[in-house]
Protein backbone atom coordinates (compact mmCIF):
# COMPACT_ATOMS: atom_id res chain seq x y z
CA UNK A 1 0.00 0.00 0.00
CA UNK A 2 2.85 2.36 0.86
CA UNK A 3 4.24 1.97 -2.62
CA UNK A 4 0.87 2.83 -4.18
CA UNK A 5 0.81 6.03 -2.14
CA UNK A 6 4.42 6.70 -3.13
CA UNK A 7 3.56 6.27 -6.82
CA UNK A 8 0.53 8.57 -6.58
CA UNK A 9 2.67 11.14 -4.76
CA UNK A 10 5.41 11.08 -7.42
CA UNK A 11 2.79 11.51 -10.13
CA UNK A 12 1.11 14.49 -8.47
CA UNK A 13 3.90 16.25 -6.59
CA UNK A 14 4.42 18.92 -9.28
CA UNK A 15 0.70 19.77 -9.07
CA UNK A 16 0.96 19.79 -5.29
CA UNK A 17 3.83 22.29 -5.23
CA UNK A 18 2.01 24.40 -7.83
CA UNK A 19 -0.99 24.34 -5.49
CA UNK A 20 1.13 25.55 -2.58
CA UNK A 21 2.46 28.42 -4.68
CA UNK A 22 -1.04 29.33 -5.93
CA UNK A 23 -2.62 29.50 -2.44
CA UNK A 24 0.36 31.47 -1.18
CA UNK A 25 -0.11 34.05 -3.93
CA UNK A 26 -3.87 34.32 -3.28
CA UNK A 27 -3.45 34.66 0.51
CA UNK A 28 -0.59 37.17 0.32
CA UNK A 29 -2.42 39.23 -2.29
CA UNK A 30 -5.56 39.64 -0.15
CA UNK A 31 -3.59 40.20 3.06
CA UNK A 32 -1.61 42.87 1.31
CA UNK A 33 -4.82 44.43 -0.07
CA UNK A 34 -6.53 44.56 3.34
CA UNK A 35 -5.47 48.03 4.43
CA UNK A 36 -6.22 49.53 1.02
CA UNK A 37 -9.67 47.91 0.73
CA UNK A 38 -10.68 48.90 4.29
CA UNK A 39 -9.64 52.46 3.53
CA UNK A 40 -11.63 52.42 0.28
CA UNK A 41 -14.78 51.03 1.98
CA UNK A 42 -14.54 53.61 4.77
CA UNK A 43 -14.24 56.30 2.15
CA UNK A 44 -17.30 54.96 0.29
CA UNK A 45 -19.35 54.82 3.49
CA UNK A 46 -18.34 58.35 4.43
CA UNK A 47 -19.45 59.57 1.05
CA UNK A 48 -23.25 59.90 0.95
CA UNK A 49 -23.18 59.25 -2.82
CA UNK A 50 -20.82 56.31 -2.51
CA UNK A 51 -21.68 52.62 -2.64
CA UNK A 52 -23.08 51.44 0.71
CA UNK A 53 -22.91 47.68 0.86
CA UNK A 54 -24.50 46.08 3.93
CA UNK A 55 -21.35 43.99 4.40
CA UNK A 56 -18.96 46.97 4.38
CA UNK A 57 -19.02 47.65 8.13
CA UNK A 58 -18.19 43.97 8.68
CA UNK A 59 -15.26 44.22 6.31
CA UNK A 60 -14.01 47.36 8.03
CA UNK A 61 -14.45 46.23 11.62
CA UNK A 62 -13.88 42.50 11.48
CA UNK A 63 -10.65 41.17 10.07
CA UNK A 64 -12.01 37.61 10.49
CA UNK A 65 -14.93 38.48 8.19
CA UNK A 66 -12.47 39.92 5.66
CA UNK A 67 -10.42 36.72 5.74
CA UNK A 68 -13.52 34.55 5.41
CA UNK A 69 -15.04 36.62 2.58
CA UNK A 70 -11.97 36.89 0.38
CA UNK A 71 -10.38 33.58 1.15
CA UNK A 72 -12.83 30.88 2.26
CA UNK A 73 -15.94 32.24 0.55
CA UNK A 74 -14.19 33.20 -2.67
CA UNK A 75 -10.70 33.10 -4.07
CA UNK A 76 -8.82 30.68 -1.83
CA UNK A 77 -11.75 28.28 -2.09
CA UNK A 78 -11.80 28.54 -5.88
CA UNK A 79 -8.07 28.01 -6.22
CA UNK A 80 -8.24 25.14 -3.75
CA UNK A 81 -11.15 23.58 -5.68
CA UNK A 82 -9.19 23.84 -8.93
CA UNK A 83 -6.21 22.08 -7.41
CA UNK A 84 -8.39 19.45 -5.73
CA UNK A 85 -9.68 18.58 -9.21
CA UNK A 86 -6.12 18.49 -10.53
CA UNK A 87 -4.93 16.24 -7.69
CA UNK A 88 -7.72 13.77 -8.48
CA UNK A 89 -6.65 13.55 -12.13
CA UNK A 90 -5.04 10.21 -12.95
CA UNK A 91 -5.50 6.53 -12.22
CA UNK A 92 -5.72 3.33 -14.23
CA UNK A 93 -7.93 4.72 -16.99
CA UNK A 94 -5.43 7.51 -17.60
CA UNK A 95 -2.60 4.94 -17.51
CA UNK A 96 -4.22 3.27 -20.49
CA UNK A 97 -3.32 6.35 -22.54
CA UNK A 98 0.26 6.34 -21.30
CA UNK A 99 0.57 2.59 -21.93
CA UNK A 100 1.60 1.58 -18.40
CA UNK A 101 -1.73 0.10 -17.34
CA UNK A 102 -0.76 -3.50 -18.14
CA UNK A 103 2.32 -3.20 -15.93
CA UNK A 104 0.18 -1.80 -13.11
CA UNK A 105 -2.53 -4.44 -13.48
CA UNK A 106 0.11 -7.17 -13.58
CA UNK A 107 0.92 -6.35 -9.96
CA UNK A 108 -1.06 -8.04 -7.16
CA UNK A 109 -3.13 -4.95 -6.50
CA UNK A 110 -6.90 -4.73 -6.92
CA UNK A 111 -8.43 -2.01 -9.08
CA UNK A 112 -10.10 -0.55 -6.00
CA UNK A 113 -6.77 -0.34 -4.19
CA UNK A 114 -5.39 1.61 -7.14
CA UNK A 115 -8.41 3.94 -7.05
CA UNK A 116 -8.54 4.58 -3.33
CA UNK A 117 -4.79 4.94 -2.83
CA UNK A 118 -4.78 7.61 -5.50
CA UNK A 119 -7.75 9.42 -3.97
CA UNK A 120 -6.20 9.16 -0.50
CA UNK A 121 -3.09 10.94 -1.76
CA UNK A 122 -5.22 13.55 -3.52
CA UNK A 123 -7.15 14.16 -0.29
CA UNK A 124 -3.95 14.45 1.77
CA UNK A 125 -2.51 16.88 -0.75
CA UNK A 126 -5.70 18.95 -0.79
CA UNK A 127 -5.72 19.00 3.03
CA UNK A 128 -2.04 19.98 3.11
CA UNK A 129 -2.61 22.84 0.68
CA UNK A 130 -5.52 24.11 2.80
CA UNK A 131 -3.40 23.86 5.99
CA UNK A 132 -0.55 25.63 4.25
CA UNK A 133 -2.92 28.50 3.50
CA UNK A 134 -3.58 28.77 7.27
CA UNK A 135 0.17 29.05 7.88
CA UNK A 136 0.45 31.79 5.24
CA UNK A 137 -2.47 33.69 6.80
CA UNK A 138 -0.99 33.35 10.30
CA UNK A 139 2.39 34.72 9.20
CA UNK A 140 0.90 37.32 6.84
CA UNK A 141 -1.53 38.63 9.48
CA UNK A 142 1.36 39.10 11.88
CA UNK A 143 3.18 41.11 9.23
CA UNK A 144 0.18 43.42 8.66
CA UNK A 145 -0.54 43.58 12.42
CA UNK A 146 -4.03 42.12 12.35
CA UNK A 147 -5.80 39.94 14.91
CA UNK A 148 -7.83 36.94 13.95
CA UNK A 149 -9.25 33.78 15.46
CA UNK A 150 -7.05 30.77 14.74
CA UNK A 151 -9.96 28.49 15.71
CA UNK A 152 -12.08 30.13 13.01
CA UNK A 153 -9.36 29.60 10.43
CA UNK A 154 -9.03 25.95 11.36
CA UNK A 155 -12.79 25.37 11.34
CA UNK A 156 -13.11 27.03 7.93
CA UNK A 157 -10.25 24.92 6.63
CA UNK A 158 -11.89 21.75 7.93
CA UNK A 159 -15.21 22.73 6.39
CA UNK A 160 -13.64 23.63 3.03
CA UNK A 161 -11.86 20.28 2.84
CA UNK A 162 -14.76 18.35 4.37
CA UNK A 163 -17.29 19.55 1.80
CA UNK A 164 -14.65 19.76 -0.95
CA UNK A 165 -14.04 15.99 -0.93
CA UNK A 166 -17.05 15.88 -3.23
CA UNK A 167 -14.97 17.70 -5.87
CA UNK A 168 -12.23 15.06 -5.62
CA UNK A 169 -14.76 12.28 -6.03
CA UNK A 170 -16.76 13.78 -8.88
CA UNK A 171 -13.56 14.95 -10.59
CA UNK A 172 -12.14 11.44 -10.56
CA UNK A 173 -15.45 10.05 -11.81
CA UNK A 174 -15.49 12.50 -14.74
CA UNK A 175 -11.89 11.64 -15.64
CA UNK A 176 -12.82 7.95 -15.59
CA UNK A 177 -15.83 8.37 -17.84
CA UNK A 178 -14.47 10.96 -20.28
CA UNK A 179 -12.37 9.67 -23.15
CA UNK A 180 -8.90 10.94 -23.96
CA UNK A 181 -6.23 12.13 -21.60
CA UNK A 182 -5.89 15.87 -21.33
CA UNK A 183 -9.23 16.28 -23.12
CA UNK A 184 -10.89 14.60 -20.15
CA UNK A 185 -9.13 17.05 -17.81
CA UNK A 186 -10.38 20.00 -19.82
CA UNK A 187 -13.91 18.60 -20.10
CA UNK A 188 -14.02 17.91 -16.36
CA UNK A 189 -12.81 21.40 -15.45
CA UNK A 190 -15.47 22.94 -17.68
CA UNK A 191 -18.29 20.55 -16.74
CA UNK A 192 -17.67 20.99 -13.01
CA UNK A 193 -16.21 24.48 -12.88
CA UNK A 194 -18.99 26.29 -14.71
CA UNK A 195 -21.94 24.99 -12.60
CA UNK A 196 -19.84 25.43 -9.43
CA UNK A 197 -19.31 29.13 -10.16
CA UNK A 198 -22.78 29.78 -11.64
CA UNK A 199 -24.60 28.04 -8.79
CA UNK A 200 -22.51 29.95 -6.26
CA UNK A 201 -23.55 33.29 -7.80
CA UNK A 202 -27.19 32.27 -8.29
CA UNK A 203 -27.53 31.08 -4.71
CA UNK A 204 -25.88 34.24 -3.41
CA UNK A 205 -28.57 36.29 -5.19
CA UNK A 206 -31.30 34.01 -3.81
CA UNK A 207 -29.95 34.43 -0.29
CA UNK A 208 -29.83 38.21 -0.72
CA UNK A 209 -33.55 38.04 -1.60
CA UNK A 210 -34.17 35.75 1.42
CA UNK A 211 -35.32 32.95 -0.85
CA UNK A 212 -34.62 29.30 -0.16
CA UNK A 213 -34.54 26.49 -2.67
CA UNK A 214 -33.45 22.86 -2.67
CA UNK A 215 -30.53 23.91 -4.90
CA UNK A 216 -28.86 25.30 -1.80
CA UNK A 217 -27.96 21.74 -0.84
CA UNK A 218 -26.05 21.33 -4.09
CA UNK A 219 -24.20 24.63 -3.65
CA UNK A 220 -20.88 23.04 -2.78
CA UNK A 221 -19.15 26.41 -2.76
CA UNK A 222 -21.50 27.72 -0.08
CA UNK A 223 -21.15 24.54 1.94
CA UNK A 224 -17.37 24.84 1.75
CA UNK A 225 -17.48 28.44 2.94
CA UNK A 226 -20.05 28.10 5.74
CA UNK A 227 -21.08 31.15 7.80
CA UNK A 228 -18.34 33.65 8.58
CA UNK A 229 -18.57 33.05 12.31
CA UNK A 230 -18.48 29.35 12.45
CA UNK A 231 -19.13 27.08 15.42
CA UNK A 232 -19.96 23.41 15.65
CA UNK A 233 -23.63 24.34 15.90
CA UNK A 234 -23.58 26.72 12.94
CA UNK A 235 -21.80 24.16 10.77
CA UNK A 236 -23.86 23.56 7.58
CA UNK A 237 -24.38 19.94 8.55
CA UNK A 238 -27.15 19.19 6.03
CA UNK A 239 -25.14 20.52 3.09
CA UNK A 240 -22.13 18.67 4.43
CA UNK A 241 -24.03 15.37 4.66
CA UNK A 242 -25.42 15.92 1.16
CA UNK A 243 -21.85 16.50 -0.09
CA UNK A 244 -20.66 13.33 1.66
CA UNK A 245 -23.60 11.35 0.31
CA UNK A 246 -22.85 12.51 -3.22
CA UNK A 247 -19.15 11.75 -2.62
CA UNK A 248 -20.06 8.20 -1.64
CA UNK A 249 -22.25 7.88 -4.72
CA UNK A 250 -19.51 9.15 -7.04
CA UNK A 251 -16.93 6.82 -5.50
CA UNK A 252 -19.31 3.85 -5.82
CA UNK A 253 -19.95 4.61 -9.49
CA UNK A 254 -16.23 5.08 -10.17
CA UNK A 255 -15.37 1.80 -8.43
CA UNK A 256 -18.23 -0.07 -10.13
CA UNK A 257 -17.26 1.28 -13.54
CA UNK A 258 -13.54 0.71 -12.91
CA UNK A 259 -14.13 -2.95 -12.02
CA UNK A 260 -15.79 -3.56 -15.37
CA UNK A 261 -13.38 -1.81 -17.72
CA UNK A 262 -11.40 -3.99 -20.10
CA UNK A 263 -7.79 -2.94 -20.60
CA UNK B 1 1.12 -33.65 -14.37
CA UNK B 2 -0.98 -30.86 -12.79
CA UNK B 3 -2.22 -28.07 -14.98
CA UNK B 4 -1.13 -24.58 -14.04
CA UNK B 5 -3.36 -22.86 -16.60
CA UNK B 6 -6.71 -24.23 -17.73
CA UNK B 7 -9.47 -22.66 -19.77
CA UNK B 8 -12.84 -24.05 -20.78
CA UNK B 9 -14.81 -22.54 -23.63
CA UNK B 10 -13.27 -19.16 -22.93
CA UNK B 11 -14.79 -16.44 -25.08
CA UNK B 12 -14.23 -12.75 -25.50
CA UNK B 13 -16.20 -10.47 -27.77
CA UNK B 14 -15.64 -6.78 -28.39
CA UNK B 15 -18.98 -5.64 -29.75
CA UNK B 16 -19.67 -7.90 -32.70
CA UNK B 17 -16.04 -8.96 -33.07
CA UNK B 18 -15.22 -12.31 -31.44
CA UNK B 19 -11.57 -12.11 -30.40
CA UNK B 20 -11.50 -15.45 -28.58
CA UNK B 21 -13.96 -18.18 -29.53
CA UNK B 22 -14.38 -21.01 -27.08
CA UNK B 23 -10.77 -21.60 -26.13
CA UNK B 24 -9.96 -24.85 -24.33
CA UNK B 25 -6.33 -24.92 -23.37
CA UNK B 26 -4.15 -26.24 -20.60
CA UNK B 27 -0.54 -25.70 -19.62
CA UNK B 28 1.22 -28.29 -17.48
CA UNK B 29 3.36 -27.45 -14.48
CA UNK B 30 7.01 -26.96 -15.39
CA UNK B 31 6.32 -26.61 -19.12
CA UNK B 32 7.80 -24.03 -21.45
CA UNK B 33 4.72 -23.43 -23.51
CA UNK B 34 4.72 -21.27 -26.62
CA UNK B 35 1.51 -19.53 -27.59
CA UNK B 36 1.56 -18.81 -31.30
CA UNK B 37 -0.77 -16.99 -33.61
CA UNK B 38 -0.95 -14.18 -36.11
CA UNK B 39 -1.52 -10.59 -35.06
CA UNK B 40 -5.11 -10.30 -33.89
CA UNK B 41 -5.48 -14.06 -33.44
CA UNK B 42 -6.51 -13.59 -29.80
CA UNK B 43 -3.23 -14.23 -27.96
CA UNK B 44 -3.09 -10.97 -26.03
CA UNK B 45 -6.82 -11.08 -25.25
CA UNK B 46 -6.38 -14.58 -23.83
CA UNK B 47 -3.40 -13.53 -21.71
CA UNK B 48 -5.26 -10.46 -20.47
CA UNK B 49 -8.26 -12.59 -19.53
CA UNK B 50 -5.99 -14.96 -17.61
CA UNK B 51 -4.67 -12.01 -15.57
CA UNK B 52 -7.99 -10.25 -14.95
CA UNK B 53 -7.25 -7.30 -17.22
CA UNK B 54 -10.06 -8.22 -19.57
CA UNK B 55 -13.31 -9.86 -18.50
CA UNK B 56 -14.32 -13.02 -20.36
CA UNK B 57 -17.65 -12.84 -22.20
CA UNK B 58 -18.24 -16.45 -21.22
CA UNK B 59 -16.36 -19.59 -20.27
CA UNK B 60 -14.06 -20.40 -17.42
CA UNK B 61 -10.39 -20.14 -16.68
CA UNK B 62 -8.22 -21.16 -13.78
CA UNK B 63 -4.60 -20.50 -12.85
CA UNK B 64 -3.19 -22.59 -9.97
CA UNK B 65 -6.82 -23.59 -9.36
CA UNK B 66 -7.96 -19.98 -8.84
CA UNK B 67 -10.75 -18.60 -11.00
CA UNK B 68 -9.69 -15.83 -13.35
CA UNK B 69 -13.18 -14.26 -13.22
CA UNK B 70 -13.16 -13.62 -9.48
CA UNK B 71 -11.43 -10.37 -8.42
CA UNK B 72 -10.22 -11.75 -5.10
CA UNK B 73 -8.84 -14.90 -6.70
CA UNK B 74 -7.34 -12.90 -9.54
CA UNK B 75 -5.35 -11.02 -6.92
CA UNK B 76 -3.94 -14.31 -5.61
CA UNK B 77 -3.13 -15.31 -9.20
CA UNK B 78 -1.14 -12.11 -9.72
CA UNK B 79 0.87 -12.82 -6.56
CA UNK B 80 1.95 -16.10 -8.09
CA UNK B 81 2.38 -14.99 -11.68
CA UNK B 82 4.98 -12.69 -13.21
CA UNK B 83 3.71 -10.98 -16.32
CA UNK B 84 5.64 -9.04 -18.92
CA UNK B 85 3.36 -7.30 -21.39
CA UNK B 86 3.95 -6.96 -25.11
CA UNK B 87 4.00 -3.18 -24.83
CA UNK B 88 6.81 -2.83 -22.31
CA UNK B 89 6.00 0.68 -21.23
CA UNK B 90 6.91 1.43 -17.64
CA UNK B 91 6.55 4.43 -15.34
CA UNK B 92 8.88 6.77 -17.20
CA UNK B 93 9.12 9.29 -14.36
CA UNK B 94 10.85 6.75 -12.10
CA UNK B 95 14.51 5.80 -12.19
CA UNK B 96 15.50 2.19 -12.76
CA UNK B 97 16.29 1.82 -9.04
CA UNK B 98 12.96 3.36 -7.99
CA UNK B 99 10.99 1.12 -10.31
CA UNK B 100 12.80 -1.98 -9.05
CA UNK B 101 12.17 -0.92 -5.43
CA UNK B 102 8.52 -0.21 -6.27
CA UNK B 103 7.94 -3.60 -7.93
CA UNK B 104 9.90 -5.55 -5.32
CA UNK B 105 7.56 -4.30 -2.58
CA UNK B 106 4.66 -6.34 -4.01
CA UNK B 107 6.45 -9.69 -4.15
CA UNK B 108 7.62 -11.38 -0.95
CA UNK B 109 9.35 -14.00 -3.13
CA UNK B 110 11.49 -11.38 -4.90
CA UNK B 111 14.96 -12.77 -5.67
CA UNK B 112 17.47 -10.00 -4.88
CA UNK B 113 20.47 -12.08 -5.88
CA UNK B 114 18.90 -12.72 -9.28
CA UNK B 115 17.96 -9.06 -9.56
CA UNK B 116 21.62 -8.09 -9.10
CA UNK B 117 22.73 -10.74 -11.57
CA UNK B 118 20.29 -9.43 -14.19
CA UNK B 119 21.27 -5.82 -13.54
CA UNK B 120 24.90 -6.76 -14.29
CA UNK B 121 23.98 -8.93 -17.24
CA UNK B 122 21.70 -6.34 -18.84
CA UNK B 123 23.97 -3.43 -17.84
CA UNK B 124 21.03 -1.34 -16.63
CA UNK B 125 21.93 2.07 -15.16
CA UNK B 126 20.20 2.32 -11.76
CA UNK B 127 20.10 6.10 -11.57
CA UNK B 128 18.69 6.73 -15.04
CA UNK B 129 15.03 7.62 -15.55
CA UNK B 130 13.02 5.07 -17.51
CA UNK B 131 12.15 7.73 -20.08
CA UNK B 132 15.85 8.07 -20.86
CA UNK B 133 16.29 4.36 -21.64
CA UNK B 134 16.40 3.00 -25.17
CA UNK B 135 13.65 0.60 -26.27
CA UNK B 136 15.97 -2.36 -25.81
CA UNK B 137 16.98 -1.25 -22.32
CA UNK B 138 13.34 -0.76 -21.39
CA UNK B 139 12.55 -4.27 -22.57
CA UNK B 140 15.43 -5.60 -20.49
CA UNK B 141 14.17 -3.72 -17.45
CA UNK B 142 10.63 -5.05 -17.97
CA UNK B 143 12.02 -8.57 -18.18
CA UNK B 144 14.13 -8.06 -15.05
CA UNK B 145 11.00 -6.89 -13.21
CA UNK B 146 9.27 -10.08 -14.32
CA UNK B 147 12.08 -12.60 -13.85
CA UNK B 148 13.14 -11.44 -10.36
CA UNK B 149 9.65 -11.81 -8.85
CA UNK B 150 10.39 -15.41 -7.98
CA UNK B 151 6.97 -16.51 -9.21
CA UNK B 152 5.97 -20.06 -10.11
CA UNK B 153 4.49 -18.99 -13.43
CA UNK B 154 5.94 -16.54 -15.92
CA UNK B 155 3.68 -15.16 -18.64
CA UNK B 156 5.56 -13.31 -21.34
CA UNK B 157 3.92 -11.53 -24.25
CA UNK B 158 6.49 -11.13 -27.04
CA UNK B 159 9.41 -11.11 -24.59
CA UNK B 160 12.23 -10.50 -27.04
CA UNK B 161 10.61 -7.79 -29.16
CA UNK B 162 12.99 -4.86 -29.55
CA UNK B 163 16.08 -6.74 -28.36
CA UNK B 164 19.31 -7.25 -30.28
CA UNK B 165 20.42 -10.82 -31.10
CA UNK B 166 22.85 -10.97 -28.16
CA UNK B 167 20.18 -9.87 -25.70
CA UNK B 168 17.69 -12.30 -27.23
CA UNK B 169 20.12 -15.14 -26.64
CA UNK B 170 20.59 -13.96 -23.04
CA UNK B 171 16.84 -13.86 -22.45
CA UNK B 172 16.31 -17.31 -23.94
CA UNK B 173 19.05 -18.72 -21.72
CA UNK B 174 17.39 -17.17 -18.70
CA UNK B 175 14.04 -18.65 -19.72
CA UNK B 176 15.62 -22.09 -20.04
CA UNK B 177 17.36 -21.80 -16.67
CA UNK B 178 14.15 -20.67 -14.95
CA UNK B 179 12.31 -23.60 -16.50
CA UNK B 180 15.05 -25.91 -15.25
CA UNK B 181 14.37 -24.60 -11.73
CA UNK B 182 10.70 -25.55 -12.08
CA UNK B 183 9.12 -22.28 -13.22
CA UNK B 184 6.32 -22.73 -15.73
CA UNK B 185 6.72 -20.44 -18.72
CA UNK B 186 3.86 -19.42 -20.99
CA UNK B 187 4.96 -17.09 -23.72
CA UNK B 188 3.72 -15.69 -26.98
CA UNK B 189 6.10 -14.95 -29.80
CA UNK B 190 6.26 -14.32 -33.50
CA UNK B 191 9.86 -15.56 -33.58
CA UNK B 192 9.37 -19.22 -34.46
CA UNK B 193 13.12 -19.86 -34.25
CA UNK B 194 13.10 -18.82 -30.59
CA UNK B 195 10.10 -20.99 -29.92
CA UNK B 196 11.81 -24.03 -31.40
CA UNK B 197 14.87 -23.25 -29.29
CA UNK B 198 13.18 -23.13 -25.89
CA UNK B 199 9.59 -24.44 -25.96
CA UNK B 200 8.63 -27.98 -25.12
CA UNK B 201 4.94 -27.44 -25.88
CA UNK B 202 3.12 -25.44 -28.53
CA UNK B 203 -0.35 -23.95 -28.54
CA UNK B 204 -1.41 -22.37 -31.81
CA UNK B 205 -4.38 -20.04 -32.03
CA UNK B 206 -6.06 -18.75 -35.15
CA UNK B 207 -9.03 -16.39 -35.22
CA UNK B 208 -9.68 -16.99 -31.55
CA UNK B 209 -9.67 -20.78 -31.78
CA UNK B 210 -7.06 -23.31 -30.80
CA UNK B 211 -5.72 -25.04 -33.90
CA UNK B 212 -2.80 -26.92 -32.40
CA UNK B 213 -2.05 -28.23 -28.94
CA UNK B 214 0.95 -30.52 -28.95
CA UNK B 215 4.39 -31.07 -27.52
CA UNK B 216 7.32 -30.06 -29.69
CA UNK B 217 8.26 -33.73 -30.03
CA UNK B 218 4.75 -34.56 -31.20
CA UNK B 219 4.84 -31.73 -33.75
CA UNK B 220 8.11 -33.04 -35.16
CA UNK B 221 6.82 -36.60 -35.11
CA UNK B 222 3.37 -36.00 -36.54
CA UNK B 223 3.80 -33.26 -39.12
CA UNK B 224 5.32 -34.42 -42.38
CA UNK B 225 5.69 -33.27 -45.91
CA UNK B 226 4.89 -36.06 -48.40
CA UNK B 227 5.93 -35.60 -51.99
CA UNK B 228 4.78 -38.19 -54.51
CA UNK B 229 5.12 -38.47 -58.30
CA UNK B 230 2.41 -40.39 -60.14
CA UNK B 231 2.55 -41.96 -63.64
CA UNK B 232 -0.95 -40.65 -64.42
CA UNK B 233 -2.56 -37.30 -63.47
CA UNK B 234 -4.43 -37.39 -60.14
CA UNK B 235 -7.11 -35.16 -58.66
CA UNK B 236 -7.32 -33.23 -55.41
CA UNK B 237 -10.34 -35.25 -54.27
CA UNK B 238 -8.14 -38.39 -54.24
CA UNK B 239 -6.41 -36.93 -51.19
CA UNK B 240 -9.35 -36.05 -48.99
CA UNK B 241 -8.29 -38.28 -46.14
CA UNK B 242 -8.11 -37.89 -42.38
CA UNK B 243 -4.73 -36.49 -41.41
CA UNK B 244 -4.11 -34.61 -44.66
CA UNK B 245 -4.07 -30.91 -43.90
CA UNK B 246 -3.33 -29.74 -47.39
CA UNK B 247 -2.78 -31.17 -50.88
CA UNK B 248 -1.08 -29.32 -53.71
CA UNK B 249 -1.05 -30.83 -57.19
CA UNK B 250 1.33 -29.67 -59.93
CA UNK B 251 1.04 -31.90 -62.98
CA UNK B 252 1.76 -35.42 -61.77
CA UNK B 253 3.53 -34.27 -58.61
CA UNK B 254 1.54 -34.10 -55.41
CA UNK B 255 2.69 -32.40 -52.23
CA UNK B 256 0.81 -33.26 -49.05
CA UNK B 257 1.01 -31.88 -45.55
CA UNK B 258 0.10 -34.62 -43.09
CA UNK B 259 -0.65 -34.05 -39.44
CA UNK B 260 -1.66 -37.59 -38.49
CA UNK B 261 -2.28 -41.15 -39.74
CA UNK B 262 0.98 -41.10 -41.69
CA UNK B 263 0.99 -44.84 -42.30
CA UNK B 264 -2.49 -44.98 -43.76
CA UNK B 265 -1.79 -41.94 -45.95
CA UNK B 266 1.37 -43.52 -47.30
CA UNK B 267 -0.53 -46.74 -47.98
CA UNK B 268 -3.17 -44.75 -49.86
CA UNK B 269 -0.50 -42.96 -51.91
CA UNK B 270 1.13 -46.27 -52.80
CA UNK B 271 -2.30 -47.64 -53.75
CA UNK B 272 -2.63 -44.80 -56.25
CA UNK B 273 0.54 -46.21 -57.82
CA UNK B 274 2.94 -43.39 -56.93
CA UNK B 275 6.28 -43.78 -58.67
CA UNK B 276 8.35 -42.14 -55.95
CA UNK B 277 7.44 -41.07 -52.41
CA UNK B 278 9.51 -38.72 -50.23
CA UNK B 279 8.62 -38.07 -46.60
CA UNK B 280 10.25 -35.00 -45.05
CA UNK B 281 9.85 -33.45 -41.60
CA UNK B 282 8.09 -30.09 -41.32
CA UNK B 283 9.64 -27.20 -39.42
CA UNK B 284 7.50 -25.42 -36.82
CA UNK B 285 7.39 -22.39 -39.09
CA UNK B 286 5.96 -24.52 -41.90
CA UNK B 287 3.43 -26.05 -39.51
CA UNK B 288 2.46 -22.57 -38.34
CA UNK B 289 2.05 -21.27 -41.88
CA UNK B 290 0.03 -24.30 -42.91
CA UNK B 291 -2.24 -24.06 -39.87
CA UNK B 292 -2.83 -20.37 -40.35
CA UNK B 293 -3.12 -20.43 -44.15
CA UNK B 294 -5.46 -23.39 -44.26
CA UNK B 295 -7.89 -21.66 -41.93
CA UNK B 296 -7.52 -18.08 -43.11
Image: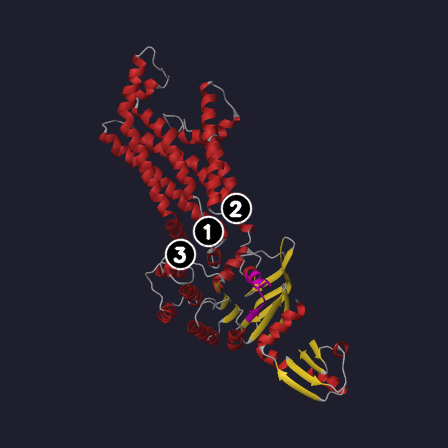
Residue highlighted by disc 3 = B92
List the single residue furthest toward the bottom: B275
Q: Chain of mark 2?
A: A
**Cα distance between the residues tagged 3 and 1:** 18 Å
* Residue B232 in sight in this render: yes
N-term mark: 2 or 1: 1
Query: Taking B88 as reference, is A116 above or below it?
Result: above
Question: Residue B221, position in %: x, y?
Answer: 62, 82
Query: Was residue B70 drawn as part of the magenta stretch in this picture?
Result: no
Disc number lying in front (3 or 1): 3
Query: Was residue B43 drawn as part of the magenta stretch in this picture?
Result: yes
Tag of residue B174: none
Discs 3 and 1 lie in a common subunit: no
Question: Residue B60, position in %: x, y?
Answer: 62, 61
Question: Residue B150, position in %: x, y?
Answer: 44, 68
**Cα distance between the residues tagged 2 and 1:** 19 Å
Q: Say which residue appears at 42% left-offset and 46% top-offset.
A: A120
Query: Taking A81 as reference, is B184 above or below it?
Result: below
Q: Which residues are magenta?
A: B34-47
Tag of residue A179: 2
Number of residue marks: 3
Q: Secondary structure at mark 3?
A: loop
Query: Taking A151 as reference, is B81 above or below it?
Result: below
Q: Say which residue appears at 65% left-offset and 54% top-offset.
A: B16
| Circle 1 residues within 10 Å: few <14, some 14–19, many ≥20 | some
Q: Say which residue appears at 29% left-offset and 19% top-offset.
A: A40
Residue highlighted by disc 1 = A114
**Cα distance between the residues tagged 2 and 3:** 22 Å
Amino acid sequence: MNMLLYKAWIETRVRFFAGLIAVTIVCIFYLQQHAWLVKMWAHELADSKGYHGAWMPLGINHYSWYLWHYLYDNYLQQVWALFALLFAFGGLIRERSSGTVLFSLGLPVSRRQWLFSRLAVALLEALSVACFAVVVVVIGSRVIHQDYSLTQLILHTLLMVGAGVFLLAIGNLCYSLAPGNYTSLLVTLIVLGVPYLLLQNYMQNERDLNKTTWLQYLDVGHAMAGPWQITWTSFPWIALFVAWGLTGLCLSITAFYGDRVDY
Amino acid sequence: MAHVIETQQLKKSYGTHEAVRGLDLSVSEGAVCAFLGQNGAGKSSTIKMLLGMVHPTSGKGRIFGHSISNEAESLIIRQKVAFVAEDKRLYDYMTVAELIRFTRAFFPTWDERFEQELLDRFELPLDRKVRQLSKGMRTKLALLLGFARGCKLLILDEPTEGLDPVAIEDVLQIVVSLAAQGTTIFFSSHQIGEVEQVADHVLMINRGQLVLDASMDEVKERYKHIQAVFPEPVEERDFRLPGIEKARIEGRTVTLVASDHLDSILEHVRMLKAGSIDVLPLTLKEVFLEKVKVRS
